[in-house]
């Protein structure tokens, strides 16, 4: 009886331990002159429309994937066509925005980051970059990586945001990539943002329960549009990638085949990042949704045999997992220079 009481108490505490990452603005998908695009998607990768709060309301404060999504609310209230029309117009606007640009730099944050924290980090990263207002477009991508609200929120954030990252990649970031043509695209991600990137490039391996839950929100994973061959040159820079071997495998356990548009994937390796190691010892890095790709080089070395586009920089010695600490590390500045993005 006492054990049941403990379980009930923990359940109550964790139910409100995390909240959804929602926009602070009522115009979250916008353009900022001279060369910034903002794109904000919900847990399923749908784009927040203007004045979203009036029609969709704030999500409940339990961060459940079951209760709140743009498509669920729109469909069940018979205005889904309005939402999809907005998304089509938005993607067309992005296409027009970048058509005369040479490079598109896309930032993707990790879990447990709200809009303001992510924006500050994106802006900080820009200070190290040599950007041309006419030739370069910076796209700040925001997704529902949830936000931890208490001591009990970390586990809830990690479990729920794992699926969110995959759907944000398939239905959010991929749709953006599919309206960009013949550009140099740089995907700069942190932590679980690496999953958003991989899921945008190739479909993730989702559990049946995840697919079924998405369908209750009227999001059909089987109808996801594949990444188009638009003659882009895609470069991925993954800081502290919180992913593992499963993220590189298809449902049949074979390694994924990536588009030839993917030219390089440069990651950081850091076995003193205790978040990736899930503790100082690090033996949990391959368990509870693996994070060992950015923690130790064993998986990297194995995947390198198949993927010649893989590169790495050793960040060992930096204990922090914080996005800002990876950005301000001199080694990141060196990576930017290698990709001809640095000052």
Image (spheres, helix red, strand yellow):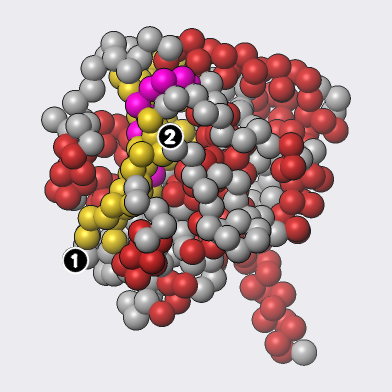
Residue 128 % position (x, y): 19, 34
- Residue 46: image quadrant is top right
How crowded pointer 2 is (Cα within 10 Å; few <14, some 14-19, many 20+) is rated as some
Q: Quadrant of the C terminus?
A: top left
* Magenta-span inclusion, residue 182: yes
75 displayed left or right of 295: right
At mark 2, the secondary structure is loop
Residue 107 in sight from this viewpoint: no
At mark 1, the secondary structure is loop
Task: Name above or below for residue 306 compared with residue 341.
Answer: below
Task: Name above or below for residue 93 compared with residue 6.
Answer: above
Marked residue nearer the N-terminal end (1 or 2): 2
Is residue 157 or residue 102 the one in the foreground?
A: 102
- Residue 224: image quadrant is top right
The CA distance from mark 1 to mark 2 is 33 Å
How crowded pointer 1 is (Cα within 10 Å; few <14, some 14-19, many 20+) is rated as few
User: Marks 1 and 2: which is nearer the front?
Assistant: 2
| Magenta residues, dominant SS class | strand
224 displayed left or right of 41: right
Mark carried by residue 317: 1
- The residue positioned 72% from the left and 82% from the top of the image is 5
Query: Where does the magenta region start and end?
Result: 180-189
* Magenta-span inclusion, residue 167: no
- Residue 299: image quadrant is bottom left
Residue underneath mark 2: 261
Task: Name above or below for residue 302 compared with residue 98.
Answer: below
- The residue positioned 65% from the left and 61% from the top of the image is 252
Is residue 129 or residue 119 the one in the foreground?
A: 129
């Amino acid at each position: 009886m006492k054990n049941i009481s403990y379980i009930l108490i923990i359940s109550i505490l964790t139910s409100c331990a995390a909240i959804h990452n929602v926009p602070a603005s009522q115009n979250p998908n916008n353009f900022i002159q001279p060369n910034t695009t903002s794109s904000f998607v919900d847990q399923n990768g749908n784009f927040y429309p203007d004045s979203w709060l009036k029609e969709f309301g704030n999500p409940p404060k339990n961060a459940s994937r079951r209760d709140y999504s743009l498509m669920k609310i729109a469909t069940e209230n018979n205005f889904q066509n309005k939402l999809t029309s907005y998304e089509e117009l938005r993607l067309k606007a992005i296409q027009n925005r970048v058509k005369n640009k040479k490079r598109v730099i896309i930032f993707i944050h990790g879990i447990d980051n709200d809009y303001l924290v992510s924006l500050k980090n994106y802006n900080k990263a820009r200070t190290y970059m040599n950007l041309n207002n006419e030739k370069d477009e910076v796209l700040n991508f925001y997704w529902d990586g949830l936000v931890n609200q208490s001591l009990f929120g970390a586990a809830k954030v990690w479990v729920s945001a794992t699926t969110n990252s995959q759907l944000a990649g398939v239905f959010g970031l991929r749709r953006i990539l599919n309206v960009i043509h013949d550009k140099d695209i740089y995907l700069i991600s942190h932590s679980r943002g690496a999953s958003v990137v991989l899921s945008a490039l190739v479909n993730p391996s989702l559990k049946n329960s995840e697919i079924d839950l998405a369908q209750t929100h009227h999001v059909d994973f089987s109808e996801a549009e594949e990444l188009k061959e638009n003659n882009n040159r895609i470069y991925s820079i993954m800081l502290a990638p919180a992913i593992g071997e499963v993220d590189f495998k298809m449902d049949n356990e074979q390694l994924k085949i990536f588009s030839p548009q993917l030219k390089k994937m440069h990651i950081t390796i850091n076995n003193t990042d205790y978040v990736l190691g899930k503790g100082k010892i690090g033996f949990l890095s391959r368990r509870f949704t693996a994070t060992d790709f950015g923690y130790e080089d064993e998986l990297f070395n194995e995947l390198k045999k198949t993927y010649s586009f893989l590169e790495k920089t050793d960040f060992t010695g930096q204990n922090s997992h914080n996005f800002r600490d990876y950005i301000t590390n001199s080694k990141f500045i060196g990576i930017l220079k290698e990709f001809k993005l640095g000052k």
